[in-house]
Image: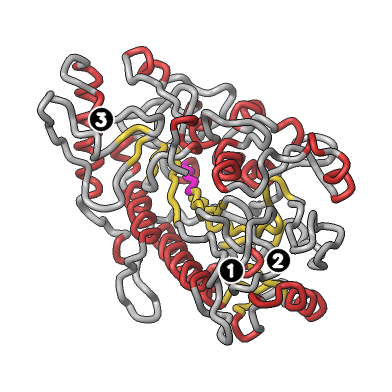
Amino acid sequence: MQISRRHFHKLAFSASAAAAMGILGRGVAFGQSSGGGYRAMVGVFLFGGNDGWNMVVPNDPALYRAYAASRGSVALPQDALAPLSGSSYSLHKAMSSLVPLWERGAMSVVLNTGTLAAPLDKATYNARADLRPSNLMSHADEQEHWQGLRAQTASRDGFMGRVNDLVAASSVPPLISFAGNNIALIGQRAQALVLPVSGTPKRVVTGNGAIDAAVASFADGSSLGTLSAANSADTKRAYDMTAATASVLASGGSVAGYFVDPATGAALTSNVAQQLKRVARMIEARASFGHDRQSFFVSQGGYDTHDGQAVSGALGTGTHANLLRDLALALSAFYNAMQALGLADNVTAFTMSDFGRTFKGNDQNGTDHAWGSNHLVIGGGVAPQSVFGRYPDPTLGGLDDVGAEGRFIPTTSQEEYIGAILRRYGVADASMSYVMPNWSTWSSNGRAPIALYGV
């Protein structure tokens, strides 16, 4: 989500702010550089609300029949599925390029995850409106809830930015977006860097002597263009940062050759592939920045599929299939690049989205705004061939549906999902309440982050 005026949060890049960036974090136990101590997380936000119910489909015969009956106009036929061996689930066939990752134990599935302020069942949802997330099924609000991890209030900062607050300063911020400014990136002290998905950051002097604000910016809203010659120390740092990132991004490095379609050998040209290729390059160059930890935000848009999600008569094709194909190819290429660097178990890529879609298809071969959805986690030493969470009862109007069209109450919270990734990244439990404001709700009374990672 691009930062709007009501979310705008300015942290001036002054000497005092730069000093604050050096604060080490509140009990966070981060490892040493390179090798087993290095960690990176890559959040892939699917803007518009991905239909996770057609991304991950049950192949158990009884559950598949219930799925097909309730989904109606958008239900995938079984020949449009790519089974995940050893499980009761399949991927959309457009994502077949991810099946080899599943087979080698490098991908996990998380079912029915979404924004929750507290555990809810249908009876509690109906009786306690005060426990529901605010403005459910609104794009802007649910994007903010996912990125800020506050389900009932506005966020002026996000979970990746708050993790960045806890990391030691370096010449280039260890939190970088190739998908523009987003709430997830904003910290309370530290700044993330927003870099272009094509070309290289450049030092462009404008008429007033400032650096052109269009080439790179900080995620809190300040930009390289605001750093005038009068702020000499800050301007020098901005120049150095621009030169360092430009030097790295000018070359595709050894990872560029992995971003090809395995079926054709053609270079991947989708925007999400280009973003992930740049992430891979920044990871490859991590030593030049002195990074023990790196976090990245990338995105793919187009998931608001109210119509034309699938093609009538060929339901395995259409807008959604095309998006999922591009996403799967990009994620597979990224994993292969990490494997070539010897970092496949050190880097976790994971999906997020506004919300899921209605289980029942509409009259336009599309789906509408809903709530819970399914997600994918790749690399990082995930538990091999594992599915976490509970698939909802697909009965329309049933025990998990808050309406009559399949708007399912999530059974796994964001904290339980993302909390597992943050632990792997190195965030200690003592710091979780800072990074995840509602941590106490999801770390007690039998709730805890899912066991996403293997031993």
For image coordinates 38% across by 43% down, the residue present is 180
> In the visual, does 38 lie left or right of 307?
left
Residue at image point 80% right, 66% down: 396
Label 3: element kind: helix
Q: Earlier in the sequence, mark 1 or mark 2?
A: 1
Residue denoted by label 2: 359
Q: Nearer the viewer, mark 1 or mark 3?
A: 3
With 378 as the anchor, is 213 left or right in this view? left
Q: Is residue 299 left or right of residue 64?
A: left
Circle on res. 102: 1
What amino acid type should be assigned to the residue bearing mark 1? Trp
Q: Earlier in the sequence, mark 1 or mark 3?
A: 1
Labelled disc at residue 224: 3
Where disc 1 sits, the SS reads helix
Residues rendered magenta in the picture? 38-42
Whichever of labels 2 and 3 marks the residue nearer the N terminus, that label is 3
Residue contact at pointers 2 and 3, CB within 8 angstroms = no
Q: CA distance from mark 1 to mark 2?
A: 25 Å
The percent coordinates of residue 428 (x first, y second) are 62, 31
Q: Residues within 10 Å of mark 1 (few under 14, many from 20)?
A: many
Identified by mark 2, the residue type is: Phe
Residue 384 makes an appearance in the image: yes
Instruction: From the image, state whether disc 2 or disc 3 is nearer to you.
Output: 2
Residue 20, how many percent across, how many down? Answer: 42, 17
Where is residue 262 shown, x and y percent of the image? 39, 76
